[in-house]
Image: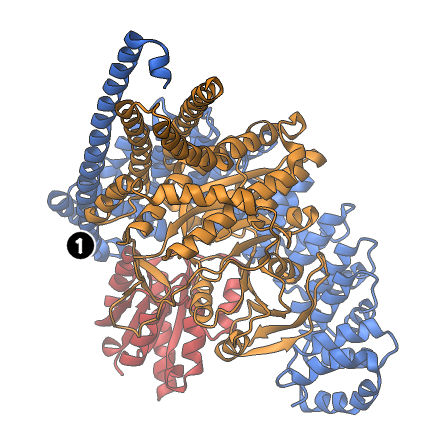
Chain colours: A red, B orange, C blue
């Protein structure tokens, strides 16, 4: 799928941060959608079948980790690349995220250029795998 | 007739003096609370809480959830607890010999499997039948034990908890997602704190969705409104000030955070006491003074917990009776601290305050009503004067309640709709049309029943908050 | 009543006084209720309006915040349409979420629109809480002028203001800012207003190289060094490894224990021999920390043997940690556990049985386990542990 038509879901509860992430991603693809809580994130992934999910761990209703676990259990959502973007700085967080199926991990405060580069990398990986 | 006259005169004097002192105390509490809370809010910084998430400075916490026959509500409540925003915590559910299928429900919902019950027995409890962990949620522990009551269940939970702080909640308390964060921040800032409570709000009437309170609304039934008012006043102007004076003796059982070490050293919860939360806090104070270790019991003036209050009179009166008996029992048990300078502000101020104003208050109030009738009967009643006096007392109390409501609105903006605020204001007037009187008499009767040993949960009629499917309207609890 | 006891004149006076008081109270009640309602309505309206403006500002500005050169123009536009407050709030919040060159661009925008000057004015207030709020705001703004103000604020007489200034300096990240923050912190520590753990955690998150440098240079007293090392381990600052290795042989047992824990978190294979030594340390918490550290580091025989011996340690925590570590070592560890289960030490055997329920067993080890099952079944004292073992999924089934 050409990069411009890739679909990316952003799961983030803070509206300003979400707006900024979406702004970054609009450079990458024109199909970026926003989920403001864990439950909505799961629904959107099921509905849109994105190539990449940018996931914050601090989400209402269902935490980011729960979302991660639930999605990784479903076979159809397994092709989706998940980038965890979180303010939690403990070492255990990254280990736990990766152990639960995250493909990449980025801490907040984040550099928009870095985020863009990582997402593009994940899209490339996903495309190569699909081929 | 001389004796009767002097009796009536003395009676009036007593009532007058009591009335003036209690109202002066309440007024000073309100004023202190105002300055305190406003200063507290100014010190807060919006970024504080979000910064917390990125740090390991906050100690991990065990959330103890004692459960007895909670098959309706336990799973949704646990799910919302799991979504708490806190870096590291565990949830310890203690099934206290439920006679329904609470265990089976838990087993099914969380894929439990048994593990060896590992833990040192720090406090003796009723036998533990088994310990379980969840395959899906590594931070969930479930204990299955024989019936022992809430205190016993909490003690068993303490035995297996792994973290230095613990939080005791009711199975049907709904926590705000940053509740634990706010309270734990206080612990991180001051190492002397052994116990902390927060503001409990009334759940009845509010909109709940997926285990979260979406919008706070005032209940409609008058008796629920009157209770709501009591909560506002009690927490905002009562506990804040008492904590400031290091005289807080009650931390609500619906939500409290404690230092595990301090509680275990003090002997854990007392299974024989009617009001175990209060008794524990008093014991913590006592131990601290006796061991000469500085200990603080604080109140975190952030709204953090929602709980269901009794919606029928029977449960309400039973609850108030239990609280009153608990109060009397605790004061009596620790009477050695009373007016004893060895126990500092707790002995010299808190205990006398609780005894004279909280415990004896309803007695004097009931006596007052009876007394007026007696005066009338003996033809000594000056009707206009008495009426004026009543008006004075009622209006004074309403002013204090109104001030508490102002504080609540100023700082916490509890109700979005003006209509809810209007209801609360109306309730402060209506409360005098029977609510207060009934409560005063009930609490007075507690003096007679205080020596009755009762060891069960004091069940209130709980209505299951049905969890709607996604996309449907949020539900309100009856209220 | 008392009123009449004093005579009719006194009675009338008291009555009038009471009546006046009641009237006054009535007025006060009305005033209270009215002001409550009015305040509620007014502040609701204000709050909703501000929130709406902030939302719109966020939508308008988001694309310019994360890239491009048009931020100043966009800010100007937004200010005209939505007012300064909403725009400044959005910019400040954004700056706390972003780092790198974009963050600098946002700081410039804030300075240009006068937000830094406004906060500077408030920072000179006589009220400590106002100063604190202003300093927090300056910390959020970032930039050179803000930094200058923060540097002077670390000497503020009020501890809360100092703390806010330190946080702002840590966020700034420049070497002189960090130095000033640490200096101020160390001065405050003895005054019990240091908020120690939080400071280390914040420092580790925002400025770990500097924290590392200070730790290695020995600038912190022992009690502080523990916290500093712990914080560095938590954010996985790899370069603290050599320092931690050296500290494994410190004279203070708590430092030894901390160093062991940190090395475990970092997964340092080079420290395994030293950690094995620590398994025989005189202090139980050092032994426990060393045992636990080995959970995350893949080890071979010497370490596995040493851990196996710890299953008979006199202190329960050490046994438990050793068992958990072995459980985390995969097949090799599982084999050690099974060997212990065959042994004579009953408590060690029970500990091993508890731990093995947590491992993922290979077919070979599962076979071994099944082989020793008869012996375990025959021993009545092993009954409870055995029942749990049999119930655990994936172990025997």
Nearest the camera: B471 or B32? B32
Q: Quadrant of residue B175?
A: bottom left
Report if residue B192 is visible in the image. Answer: no
> Taking C88 as reference, is A58 left or right?
right
Q: Residue at x 27, y 79 (%)?
A: A48
Q: Residue at x 21, y 53 (%)?
A: C55
Report if residue B183 is visible in the image. Answer: yes
Nearest the camera: C329 or B196? B196
Q: Quadrant of residue A45?
A: bottom left
Where is residue A98 shown, x and y percent of the image? 49, 71
User: How many numbered dots are placed on residues in this image?
Assistant: 1
Query: Taking B21 as reference, is A107 above or below it?
Result: below
Where is residue B85 shown, x and y percent of the image? 44, 58
Dot 1 falls on which chain? Answer: C
Nearest the camera: B373 or B438? B373
- Going by the picture, which residue comes out furthest to the left? C81
Nearest the camera: C307 or B21? B21
Q: Secondary structure at mark 1?
A: helix
Q: Residue at x 79, y 91 (%)?
A: C371
Where is residue C354 shown, x and y percent of the image? 71, 75
Query: Which residue is under mark 1?
Result: C60
Query: Taking A34 as reference, is B332 above or below it?
Result: above
> Taking A10 as reference, is B50 left or right?
right
> Taking B13 as reference, is C14 left or right?
left
Quarter in which the C terminus of chain B is drawn: bottom left
């Amino acid at each position: 799928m050409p990069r411009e038509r890739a679909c990316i879901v952003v799961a983030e509860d803070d509206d300003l941060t979400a707006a900024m992430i979406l702004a970054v991603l609009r450079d990458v693809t024109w199909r970026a959608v926003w989920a403001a809580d864990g439950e909505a994130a799961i629904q959107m992934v099921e509905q849109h079948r994105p190539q990449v999910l940018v996931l914050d761990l601090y989400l209402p209703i269902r935490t980011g980790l729960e979302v991660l676990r639930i999605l990784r259990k479903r076979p159809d959502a397994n092709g989706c690349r998940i980038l965890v973007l979180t303010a939690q700085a403990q070492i255990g967080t990254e280990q736990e995220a990766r152990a639960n199926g995250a493909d990449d991990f980025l801490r907040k405060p984040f550099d928009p250029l870095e985020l863009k580069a990582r997402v593009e990398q994940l899209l490339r990986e996903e495309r190569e795998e699909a081929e | 007739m001389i004796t009767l006259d002097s009796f009536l005169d003395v009676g009036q004097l007593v009532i007058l003096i009591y009335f003036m002192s209690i109202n002066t105390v309440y007024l000073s509490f309100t004023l202190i609370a105002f300055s305190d809370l406003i200063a507290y809010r100014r010190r807060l910084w919006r970024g504080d809480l979000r910064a917390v998430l990125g740090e390991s400075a906050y100690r991990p916490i065990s959330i103890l959830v004692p459960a007895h026959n909670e098959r309706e509500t336990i799973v949704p409540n646990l799910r919302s607890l799991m979504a708490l925003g806190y870096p590291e915590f565990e949830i310890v559910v203690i099934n206290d010999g439920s006679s329904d299928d609470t265990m089976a429900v838990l087993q099914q919902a969380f894929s439990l499997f048994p593990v060896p019950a590992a833990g040192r027995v720090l406090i003796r409890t009723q036998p533990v039948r088994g310990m379980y962990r969840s395959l899906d949620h590594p931070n969930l522990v479930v204990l299955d034990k024989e019936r022992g009551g809430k205190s016993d269940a909490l003690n068993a939970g303490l035995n297996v908890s792994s973290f230095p702080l613990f939080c005791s909640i009711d199975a049907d308390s709904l926590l705000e997602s940053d509740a634990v964060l706010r309270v734990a921040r206080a612990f991180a800032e001051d190492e002397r704190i052994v116990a902390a409570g927060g503001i409990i709000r009334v759940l009845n009437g509010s909109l709940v969705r997926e285990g979260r309170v979406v919008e706070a609304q005032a209940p409609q039934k008058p008796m629920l409104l009157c209770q709501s008012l009591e909560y506002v006043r009690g927490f905002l102007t009562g506990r804040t000030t008492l904590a400031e004076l290091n005289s807080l003796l009650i931390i609500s059982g619906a939500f409290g955070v404690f230092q595990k070490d301090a509680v275990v050293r003090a002997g854990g919860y007392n299974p024989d006491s009617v009001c175990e939360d209060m008794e524990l806090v008093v014991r913590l104070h006592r131990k601290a003074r006796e061991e000469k270790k500085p200990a603080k019991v604080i109140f975190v003036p952030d709204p953090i917990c929602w709980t269901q209050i009794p919606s029928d009179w029977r449960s309400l009166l039973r609850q108030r009776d239990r609280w009153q008996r608990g109060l009397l029992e605790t004061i009596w048990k620790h009477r050695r601290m009373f007016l004893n300078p060895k126990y500092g502000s707790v002995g010299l101020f808190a205990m006398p305050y609780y005894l004279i104003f909280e415990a004896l208050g309803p007695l004097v109030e009931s006596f007052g009503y009876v007394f007026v009738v007696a005066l009338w009967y003996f033809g000594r009643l000056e009707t206009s004067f008495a009426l004026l006096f009543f008006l004075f007392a009622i209006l004074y109390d309403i002013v204090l309640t109104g001030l508490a409501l102002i504080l609540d609105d100023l700082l916490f903006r509890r109700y979005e709709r003006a209509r809810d605020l209007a209801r609360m204001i109306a309730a402060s007037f209506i409360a005098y049309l029977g609510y207060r009187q009934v409560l005063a008499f009930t609490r007075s009767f507690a003096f007679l029943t205080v020596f009755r040993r009762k060891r069960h949960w004091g069940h209130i009629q709980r209505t299951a908050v049905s969890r709607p499917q996604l996309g449907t309207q949020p539900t309100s609890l009856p209220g | 009543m008392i009123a009449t006891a004093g005579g009719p004149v006194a009675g009338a006076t008291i009555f009038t006084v009471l009546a006046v008081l009641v009237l006054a109270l009535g007025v006060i009640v009305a005033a209270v209720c009215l002001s409550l309602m009015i305040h509620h309505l007014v502040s609701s309206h204000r709050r909703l309006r501000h929130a709406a403006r902030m939302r719109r500002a966020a939508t308008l500005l988001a694309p310019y915040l994360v890239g491009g050169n048009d931020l100043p123009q966009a800010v100007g536009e937004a200010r005209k349409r939505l007012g300064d407050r909403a725009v400044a709030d959005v910019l400040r919040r954004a700056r706390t979420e972003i780092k790198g060159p974009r963050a600098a661009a946002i700081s410039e925008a804030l300075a240009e629109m006068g937000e830094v000057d406004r906060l500077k004015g408030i920072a000179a207030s006589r009220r400590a809480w106002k100063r604190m709020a202003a300093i927090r705001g300056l910390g959020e703004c970032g930039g050179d002028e803000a930094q200058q103000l923060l540097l002077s604020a670390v000497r503020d007489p009020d501890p809360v203001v100092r703390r806010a200034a330190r946080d702002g300096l840590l966020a700034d990240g420049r070497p002189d800012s960090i130095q000033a923050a640490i200096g101020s912190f160390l001065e405050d520590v003895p005054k019990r207003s240091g908020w120690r753990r939080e400071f280390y955690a914040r420092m580790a998150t925002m400025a770990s190289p500097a924290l590392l440098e200070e730790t290695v240079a020995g600038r912190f007293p022992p009690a502080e060094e523990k916290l500093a090392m712990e914080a560095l381990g938590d954010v996985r600052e790899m370069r603290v490894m050599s320092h931690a290795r050296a500290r494994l042989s410190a004279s203070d047992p708590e430092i030894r224990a901390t160093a062991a824990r940190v090395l475990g978190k970092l997964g340092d294979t080079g420290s395994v021999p030293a950690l094995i030594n620590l398994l025989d340390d005189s202090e139980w918490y050092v032994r426990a920390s060393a045992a636990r550290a080995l959970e995350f580091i893949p080890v071979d025989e010497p370490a596995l043997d040493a851990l196996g011996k710890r299953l008979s340690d006199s202190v329960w925590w050490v046994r438990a940690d050793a068992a958990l570590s072995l459980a985390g070592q995969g097949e090799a560890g599982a084999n050690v556990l099974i060997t212990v289960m065959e042994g004579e030490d009953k408590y060690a055997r029970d500990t091993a049985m508890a731990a093995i329920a947590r491992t993922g067993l290979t077919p070979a080890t599962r076979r071994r386990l099944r082989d020793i099952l008869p012996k375990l079944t025959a021993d009545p004292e092993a009954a409870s542990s055995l029942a749990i073992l049999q119930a655990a999924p994936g172990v025997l089934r």
